[in-house]
Amino acid sequence: MPQKSAAPLWLKLAYSAFVAVLVPVYWHNYGPANFLYFCDMALLLTFFGLWREDRLLISMGACGIVAPQILWVLDFAAHAFGLKITGVTDYMFADSSAFLRGLSLFHGWLPVLLVWLVWKLGYDRRALLAWTGLAWSAMLVSYFFLPPPSPDAGLAAVNVDYVFGPSDTEPQRWMAPSLWLVTLMSGLLAVFWFPSHVVLSKWRGTAACAKKT
């Protein structure tokens, strides 16, 4: 008897349609470098993981972005009420294309989808090492080969993954650039990815229930 799919076909088709719109639009407006942002990498990992129902790919996305995107959602909600937490969602309230801002709302629903998929498929404990290797590689590419912060960048992707500091208009000046990079890489692992790995490793959903039967 064929195994029942963990994700319904309509979800796979809807997600694929969204990705089919977002990728060329982002490529045209922001350039290919934009896809080295963690959220965009997780979006693509989820696309392949959803169709293959691949626990590792889904787990990598969940481990990498669920915790940081909670911060994105909080910052977005605060900004809507005139408050400011980190400023990472300032671009959502800038005078730019409403269509582009609408596409960017995936930052809010993708973490929810990933948690649900982990619930359905189970969590692969290899995800922390795999995601860390992928994310750190992207950060090194961004640091050595992509543009630094610039006030005249427009929509072009600069300071990808904040490897030069928290601002897209000027680099941080608190420490040496290489020290910032190392601090950021280790800090993301310690503050976001490892705690997410621990929590998701204990996540018990339908996959865990199926193993008991």
Image: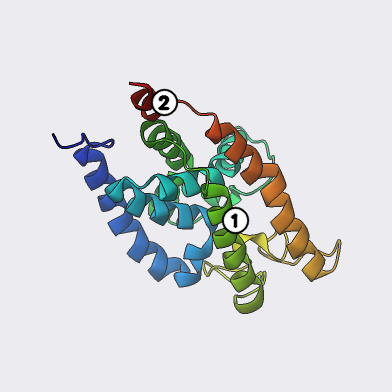
The image shows residue 66 at horizontal and vertical percentages of 54, 40
Give the distance between the C-alpha atoms of the residues marked 1 and 2, in whole angstroms: 25 Å
Going from the N terminus, do you reach mark 1 or mark 2 first?
A: 1
The quadrant in which residue 146 appears is bottom right
Residue type, mark 2 in image: Gly
Q: What crowding class fits label 1: few (fewer than 14 Cα within 10 Å), some (14-19), or many (20 or more)?
A: many
Q: Quadrant of the C terminus?
A: top left
* Number of marks drawn: 2
The image shows residue 121 at horizontal and vertical percentages of 37, 36
Coloring scheme of the render?
A: rainbow
Label 1: which residue?
Answer: 132
Label 2: which residue?
Answer: 205
Question: Residue 71 or 43: which is nearer the viewer?
Answer: 43
Question: Residue 38 or 52: which is nearer the viewer?
Answer: 52
The image shows residue 197 at horizontal and vertical percentages of 58, 40
> Which residue is pictured at 41% across the width and 27% down the height?
208
Question: Residue 97 or 179: which is nearer the viewer?
Answer: 179
**Residue 105 visible in rendering:** no
The quadrant in which residue 80 appears is top right
The image shows residue 179 at horizontal and vertical percentages of 81, 65
